[in-house]
Image: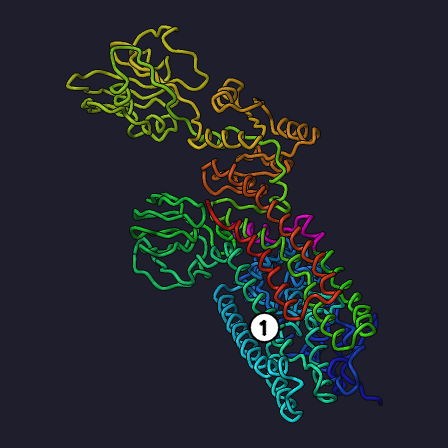
Amino acid sequence: MTKKTCFHCGLDVPENIHLPVVYEDEPRETCCAGCQAVAQSIIDAGLGSYYKQRTADAQKAALPSDEVLAQLKLYDLPEVQADFVEADSGGRREAVLMLGGITCAACIWLIEQQLLRLKGVIRVDLNYSTHRARVVWDDNAVALSDILLRIQSTGYTAAPYDAQKVEAQHQKERKQFIVRLAVAGLAMMQTMMFAVPTYFYGGDIEPLYLEILHWGGFLMVLPVVFYAAMPFYRGALRDLKNRRVGMDTPIALAVVMTFAAGIYSLISNADQGMYFESIAMLVFFLLAGRFMEQTARRKAGDAAERLVKLVPAFCHVLKNYPADETAEEGVVAKLQRGDVVLVKAGEVIPVDGTVLAGESEANEAMLTGESLPVAKSAGAKVTAGTLNAAGPLIVRTEQTGGETRLSHIVKLLDRALAQKPRAAELAERYASSFVVGELVLAVPVFIGWTLYADMQTALWITVALLVITCPCALSLATPTALAAATGALAGKGVLVGGRQSLETLAQINDVVFDKTGTLTRGEPGVFRIVPLGRLNISDGLAAAQALEQQSEHPLAKAILRHEIPDGPKPEITVAQRINRIGHGVSASLTVNGESQIWSLGRAEFVAEIAGRLEETAVPEHDGTVIYLGNQQGFQTAFLLADEIKDSAADAVAALKAQGLRLHLLSGDRQVAAQTVADTLGLDECRAEAAPEDKLAYVEALQRQGRKVLMVGDGINDAPVLAKADVSAAVAGGADVARDGADVVLLNDDLRILPEMLAKAVQTRRVIRQNLSWAGAYNLIAVPLAVFGFVTPWIAALGMSLSSLVVVGNAVRLAKRR
């Protein structure tokens, strides 16, 4: 009987074991459950070609190793995913991964393409600035381990996101980069020490000593070639493995070619140039440029990183509150809805929740851009990531982890930093094609200069061509600008999350506002106080506030909120208060020693005590009118209306100065809407509009070729927010409006709108400047290199400087006015 061997490891399969895997539509036997799982994982991940390519001698060496695959499989366990994966009942999963091995924007593109080709992956948002990937997948079609395996097989590393691990990884990579840079710098100085004498006195140096100088340069350059230049080799090999050419390919090729030529010259003829000092200078300048570029890029896109690090890892849990207020140390990641936590003064609030006890102030500047602290007391809402500045607070947990407002903000930022304007997509395609063309061009250049001059001249010209024309600046032009602009806006409380949103914002012609909750506060306020009797305005307001002291009605709160004018205030005592729901409140008031029955409310309710009201006594008002009267008649009328936000007038004036047409689109009454439009000086006003009317209004503007920014807050704004070219949801809006919006305003200050549009225009200008500079640089650099006007070290310096110019120009967007 023929023995069966394991399809995966090659060992014998026991007779009583039947654990097949299907490969190329045929069952293949495996020797154990572990081999079966590993083999099936490799096949399902699209890596089945491995079993064709391996040799007979290598059959027992799994690629990837069993240990690696076993570790990846652990990420599929529900208890492991509970800490970092968001799940819904339909099998949809979402996780944030930290990526390793990223060297340029082309790496991001490669990972994105590899993951999107994986069946079951729904969306991939990759943040080039922070090296984070937010992946959404269907758990019924693909496992998380398959996603991690695909990233590893592409040549990168991936693991669940952990802010502390990311920081540790960043510090480790930074130290390694500094060491490589130091090695290259020292080697450059040492090789130059051996090379300079040959420049000036090469013909006069005795052959023995000339050979010693050349061998000295060779020994000094070895650490550069075999250590400092390793990142370029890894990048080139990874690109080769994935059948593409990237930014590292021409650089690695140039270093290897030059080193090979130097060794050949060293062995064959010591009188020729050795090129070793050129290699050291080339690698040093390239590493220095890349190090500065990465530092600037990280600075430009650190907004999301700062937000992620806001939530603490530990907290104080009150397990038996309110019976026992003894706090125990707990892990924030394990908190559940309903848990009660104690937040001491100076600590960061770990959850979204409601204050149960305590009074304090919260600094919410990191989330909203508002520098003033916000008072917090029992019943107030608090947000994860904000700082408890004054006193201790006891908070009941309502949202944790990925459900918090902070997590939602980070998602929007990741989505914004992953967006690619059309110019960026064109630049990426051009950059890839340019590298291919550069490699093709290098061949005739080398042959031509060999025939025209000699091989030595041809070599350094070809190397200079490969290095100076690397299109790094072109690939960096857009991602760095988007990261800087998005981070700057996030710092001021504006989250730009929609695809292409920042690009489209720069093209806006019309801004359409909703009224209630957008231009107005969404709550009534005292618009005007009209005296009707002997009482002055101050005394009338004081009497009304005394009557409403115990009321929670919105109209009562508006009267209580209104400030009494300066001057002497009457002494008032209240007795026998009677509240008639829907009509008003009455009580016995003693005002400056005189006691009477007073009423506050509707005209017919007050008339029961005050008598008849003259129809002409109160001016026409489109809002609500509340009357105050006593036994001597009607005394005061309070005209209430939805108050216009303090920042609305300044915002409208600034938007008009930018040449935009402004519209008011409201479902409110014509008189109310027109009053707001006239007060603010808006160009158009449409009132009493149903959701479908709002949608039709915006569509009509778009048919005229207008680019529309819609600003709203309510549920009835969701359809029109989705239809507009760019939509903005204001602070406090309904969740469905915020989820459907491209831009979320985290505070009520509308003056950020003109700043946002100005930043979008500036971003578009910077991107165009960067692309123009990168394109012009390559157009100039190619002929200079081809015709031999550039040496390799100058080429390295030029390429690094071109990237730094692009990044430096983009970082200007991160500055706040």
Quick one: label 1, few (<14), some, or many (20+) residues within 10 Å?
many
**x and y percentages locating residue 41 in the rendered image:** 70, 71
**x and y percentages locating residue 775 in the rendered image:** 69, 54
Residue at the image position 74 percent from the left and 74 percent from the top: 457
Residue closest to the eye, 270 or 257:
270
Q: Is residue 420 magenta?
A: yes
Residue at the image position 19 percent from the left and 19 percent from the top: 591
Q: Which residue is mark 1?
A: 284
Q: Is residue 483 above or below residue 19?
A: above
Q: Which residue of the protein is positioned furthest toward the bottom in this rendering?
A: 208
Q: Residue flagged by tag 1: what amino acid is it?
A: Phe
Residue at the image position 41 percent from the left and 44 percent from the top: 370
Residue closest to the eye, 739 or 373:
373
Q: Which residue of the protein is positioned furthest toward the left in this rendering?
A: 593
Is residue 280 rendered to the left or right of residue 643?
right
**x and y percentages locating residue 724 in the rendered image:** 63, 36
The residues colored magenta run: 408-427
Residue closest to the eye, 129 or 719:
129
Residue at the image position 16 percent from the left and 16 percent from the top: 594
Quadrant of the rendering where the N terminus is positioned: bottom right
Residue 325: image quadrant is: bottom left
Judged by its main secondary structure, the magenta piece is: helix
Q: Is residue 141 above or below residue 631?
A: below
**Residue 795 in view here:** yes
Q: Is residue 432 magenta?
A: no
Residue 444: image quadrant is: bottom right
**Residue 140 in view here:** no
Q: SS class of the residue under badge 1?
A: helix
Residue closest to the eye, 403 or 782:
782
Q: Is residue 216 above or below residue 817?
A: below
Q: Is residue 798 above or below residue 739?
A: below
